[in-house]
Amino acid sequence: MPALISSRFLLFGGSLPFQKLTRVSRKTWFHSSVSARHQVDRDSGPLTLASLGIKSKLETTEPRETNRVKRLNSHTEVPKDRKTVRSNVVKSAGMPKKLEIEAAPFAAESFSELGLPPTLIERLENEGFTTPTDVQSAAIPVILKSQDVVIQSYTGSGKTLAYLLPILAEVGPLKKRNASGGNGESGKKTDVEAVIVAPSRELGMQIVREVEKILGPTYKKAVQQLVGGANRSRQEEALKKNKPVIVVGTPGRIAEISASGKLHTHECRYLVLDEVDELLSFNFREDMHRILEHVGRRSGADPKNPLAKRVERQTILVSATVPFSVIRAARSWGHDPLLVQAKKVVPLESISQAGPISPSKTTTSSSSSSNLQGQPAVESLPPALKHFHCVTRLQHKVDTLRRCVHALDAKSVIAFMNHTRQLKDAVYKLEARGMKAAELHGDLGKLARSTTLTKFKRGEVRVLVTNELSARGLDVAECDLVVNLDLPTDSTHYAHRAGRTGRLGRPGTVVSLCEEPEVFVVKKLQKQLGIPIPACEFVEGKLTVTEEEKTAKPLNS
Ligand SMILES: Nc1ncnc2c1ncn2[C@@H]1O[C@H](COP(=O)(O)OP(=O)(O)OP(=O)(O)O)[C@@H](O)[C@H]1O
């Protein structure tokens, strides 16, 4: 019924101010715990009033005031001098054709414009973060208004802080209501308040370091890592002793500790799935199911259904590549979720399967690749990246890589291969030619993995030879060249691999090495991604473009 009213009310939709859009009237979302199914098919449901921030006169019954609704109502207003943007709700009798209600969020010039508390801004300044990126400008105010979101923007555009900052504004020692500098613990509280899930240990640890950086040395125990491969009892002890407000971990370890009763998440306010399209893959299915069933779900007081549980958490899904499976999941798990990109915020209901946010056209059953029928997704890749391919014989690939590194005078290189067992051989060949190299893959122990990564970040290793493990999220600012020794399996994998270079507007080059019969794959990637990937050669220590390509010019010439 409310949905019906909502769609009818779209008739009265006009230009909405941004604040209206985000002042959401929420309803508690009930699910049966008996069915153990959190999936509610709302794909075809119309846009609701709540998602537009319009309070319907026809909504006579007040929604039950859950804690989350209270929070929504008690939110600090965004400063009045903040620039507002116009919204366009197309007047229509049914579902509007275009529901782009937020055409262009402003690019803020400072974090203080975004409604973050002064203590947090001070910490950001101490760490050298002064200007928000576009995606941060768009996401922070929306998340601060308790909106469920999917954040999509290209690799290296600052998505991590885009979700961390609004969370830190609300929970932990730097939060708004605790701006005097207390430790932010209520005393009684045992539940964590934010759970952040990442698909690899490396990414999990990287996020932990980012949170610690913002919290500063005094408060760094407010975050706890729960990644696999590390000592579990030590993690459990730390949970008990430090009572962290934020935990960051891999699905398996979080689910394991949660199942053992040592991680209390029912009161949790935020659930973040970083690299969500990867987390939706079959491998993580059971663990993700447990996480989604427990984080922020409390036994409800619905007299008609005593076993029902309320979902009170705010769900934040993040990736550079957002296939339609993610859109579907977000609609199921969240309440009127919004898609937040660097330059626009739109209701997810407005995204159709022919939308422009995914790079791949694959239709396999893997959720990470069951994508939208695709328009090119240049938004997944940093705009300044240069892409080339070089045809070479299989046995000459490593030598071509070496010549490529010299030709571009690259200082920090990530070389991707598809099979773990081939990494060692490539490292051996590079080292034999005097190029410092190391392998990184999931079969190595946690210590070996972190030692290698540290050496690479310090510049002690020039070429990191790795597999898909390092394709997602890895943030090494200095990485100036990515080489595909083997072609990636699809454009999604290409985008994440390529995104290891050219982070945050830095220059970067991606070179894919392939054999003659594989050139058609490059052409396909080029088409799907909407970028030129011209052929090149390495002649006399220089990269020379050999294919006529107006947009690409020879480098180093
Ligand atoms: N506002 C900012 N000012 C300066 N540096 C920033 C800012 N925001 C983020 N960064 C830095 O930019 C780098 C890239 O950010 P981040 O890893 O969050 O990108 P991402 O969009 O999540 O990339 P990916 O999709 O590859 O995971 C990090 O080193 C981060 O510390």
Image: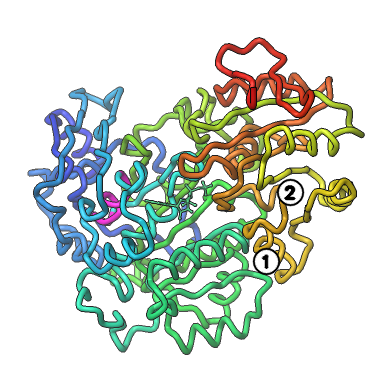
**Quadrant of the image for the C terminus?**
top right
How far across and how far down the image is residue 382, in percent?
A: 50, 35
Is residue 239 visible in this depiction of the protein?
Answer: yes
Q: Residue at label 2?
A: 463
How far across and how far down the image is residue 547, in percent?
A: 69, 13
**Quadrant of the image for the N terminus?**
top left
Which residue is located at x 14 percent, y 56 percent?
77
Q: Residue at label 1?
A: 450
Cα separation between marks 1 and 2:
16 Å
* In the foreground, 399 or 314: 399
> How many numbered marks have been drawn onto this rendered protein structure?
2
Which residue is located at x 19 percent, y 39 percent?
5
* In the foreground, 342 or 312: 342
Q: Amino acid at mark 2?
A: Val
**Magenta-drawn stretch, dominant element (helix, strand or loop):** helix
Q: Is residue 90 above or below residue 41?
A: above
Q: Is residue 281 above or below residue 487?
A: below
Is residue 1 visible in this depiction of the protein?
Answer: no
- Which quadrant would residue 494 be assigned to in this image? top right
Report if the CB atoms under discs 1 and 2 are less than 8 Å apart: no
Q: Residues within 10 Å of mark 2 (few under 14, many from 20)?
A: many
Asked whether residue 467 is drawn in magenta, I would say: no
- Assign a secondary structure to mark 2: strand
Q: Amino acid at mark 1?
A: Ser
265 to the left or right of 143: right
Q: What span is in magenta?
A: 138-146
Q: Is residue 354 above or below residue 253?
A: above
* In the foreground, 346 or 163: 163
Which residue is located at x 66 percent, y 51 percent?
470
550 to the left or right of 245: right
How far across and how far down the image is residue 101, in percent?
A: 24, 33
